Amino acid sequence: MREVMDLEVFATAEEAGARVADLAAQQVENFPRSVLGLATGSTPIPIYEGIVRHVRAGRITLAQVTTFNLDEYVGLGPDDPHSFAFYMRQHLFGPLALNPAQTFMPPNQGPDLKTRAPSYDRLIEGRGGIDWQLLGIGRNGHIGFNEPGTPFDSETHIAALSDSTRRANAPWFDNDWDRVPRQAVTMGLATIMRSRAIVLAAFGEDKADALAQAFRGPLTPEVPASVLRSHPSVVVIADRAAARLLAPSRGAYPV
Ligand code: PGA
């Protein structure tokens, strides 16, 4: 087990986000039919801006990729502005005019959701598995919506969101954390770990503790991101504030 993943630290979230966008572009340039695992939240915004820039500059096209999002709130339709489906159309799929048939979100509505949720893993496997997975990290060490205590062998499932996560996501709901849904469907930790390559992005001071616990503390379901230390291909891209408690191992250190 490695003490810390490949780590690259940048002065600002914008620079770090541009680096992640470069890595995504490299993946798609080398393998135009890549299956990409995508994330939502504030972290991917500069990343998706960078990807859109690469496409507009003609460096890459996403015309042949397939995408699978990590998670989605239970019960929100795709036209609900709080849904991650809406977010993805706003930040990436819309600007790039991706064919909706290329883009998948976890099932999040309708009856029998609990039994239907794991079918997402089969859908992913049917497309050959995820080649390149983008992750953020929660202040409590979650990845996707796998909250502390989620078993490492979990597949896509319905997750109850912790108060900490609901408070962190309140800014998307007019700062009213009561309005943040209580459940989401999320890829499980086993689903994420089956990805061939993983890039975890962490920006801002309030991610420093979670990063340190994940990559310096014990390997434990209490810190879901710690599972990544047993994955063979993980790169952590952080800004200086988020990496404050981690000593760089290798990579670019332009700070
Ligand atoms: P954020 O969320 O990018 O909005 O900070 C990350 C996460 O909770 O995984």
Image (tube, grey):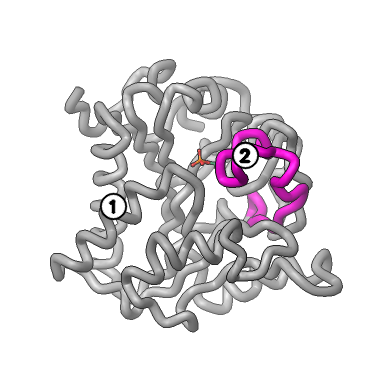
Q: Position of residue 152 (x, y in %)?
A: 69, 44
Residue toward you, 39 or 81: 81
Q: Residue at x 31, y 57 (%)?
A: 24
Q: Are marks 2 and 1 in contact (CB under 8 Å)?
A: no
Q: Quadrant of residue 10?
A: top left
The residue indicated by pointer 1 is 21
CA separation in Å, label 2 and label 1: 26 Å
Q: Earlier in the sequence, mark 2 or mark 1?
A: 1
Q: Quadrant of residue 141?
A: top right
Residue toward you, 251 or 137: 137
Read off the magenta span: 165-190
Residue 25 in the magenta stretch? The answer is: no
The quarter of the rendered structure image containing the C terminus is top left
Residue toward you, 100 or 223: 100
The label shown at residue 207 is none
Q: Position of residue 236 (x, y in %)?
A: 39, 37
Q: Position of residue 83 (x, y in %)?
A: 60, 60
Q: Position of residue 162 (x, y in %)?
A: 74, 37
Indicate the amino acid at tag 1: Ala
Indicate the amino acid at tag 2: Ala
The label shown at residue 170 is 2
Q: Quadrant of residue 35?
A: bottom left
Farthest residue, direction front: 174
Q: Secondary structure at mark 1?
A: helix
